[in-house]
Image (spheres, helix red, strand yellow):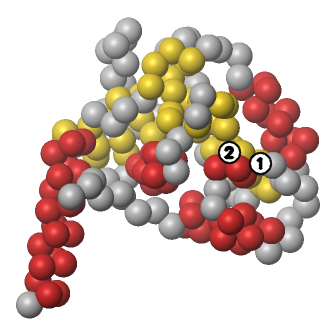
Amino acid sequence: MGAIKMRVQFKSLFKNEKMIVGKNWVSNNHFIVNRDVLTKPQNNWLDKQNLPDEDERLENVTKELCKYDVAEKFIAQQICCKGNTVAYTPTKDEEKFYVDGRYYHFFTNRKVDIYITDNYNPISALYLIKNNKFVGLLMPLKIKSNKEFVDYDKWKKEREEEKRLKKESQIV
């Protein structure tokens, strides 16, 4: 049995967030992503919002924030017990990087990799890369260190087991 994806509704990424849409890019002020990454229904939903084309603005922001080279892939190592923050400690530094769990799961489900840049600043934009092509930016979170984190792989296995048990109980 393959790994279960942590499902994230695309529309939920814009709830209580500013939506900025262009022909090629979309943002909610926490990420900017090329619309090629999105599914046809997701793109159709964006088009139905009838917002002004902000491509030029989004491209300028992307260029402004892309000043560094890719250093290493952000791979979830820990997750806040509530599942809303994912943490990674890069090999070069002991300072952790944090991202919103919804964004992490949404992009990794779309086969987009998240990368830390070579300035290793935990508040600098992270790069979104798909098939070796730059497809956007993701802003990390700055959090208080008193949050309780658990091992990500263990957490994910527990979620998968919960889903399996729920499915089995529905069969009976």
Q: Is residue 99 rendered to the left or right of residue 44?
A: left
User: Which of the labelled discs sits on residue 25, or is there none?
Assistant: 1
Give the distance between the C-alpha atoms of the residues marked 1 and 2, in whole angstroms: 6 Å
| Residue count near mark 1 (Cα–Cα under 10 Å), binned few <14, some 14–19, many ≥20 | many
Up-down relation of residue 28 to residue 133 (above or below): below
What residue type is disc 1 on? Trp
Residue 163 pos. (x, y %): 21, 69
Q: Which residue is at the front of the view, 37 or 123? A: 37
Residue linked to disc 2: 33
- Residue 68, image quadrant: top right
Up-down relation of residue 2 to residue 50 (above or below): above
Q: Residue at x 27, y 53 (%)?
A: 3
Quadrant in the picture for the C terminus = bottom left
What residue type is disc 2 on? Val
Residue 162 pos. (x, y %): 16, 67
Which secondary structure lies at badge 2?
strand
Q: Is residue 58 rendered to the left or right of residue 1?
A: right
Q: Residue at x 33, y 36 (%)?
A: 76
Residue that lies at the very extreme toward the front in this rendered image: 1
Q: Residue at x 72, y 64 (%)?
A: 43
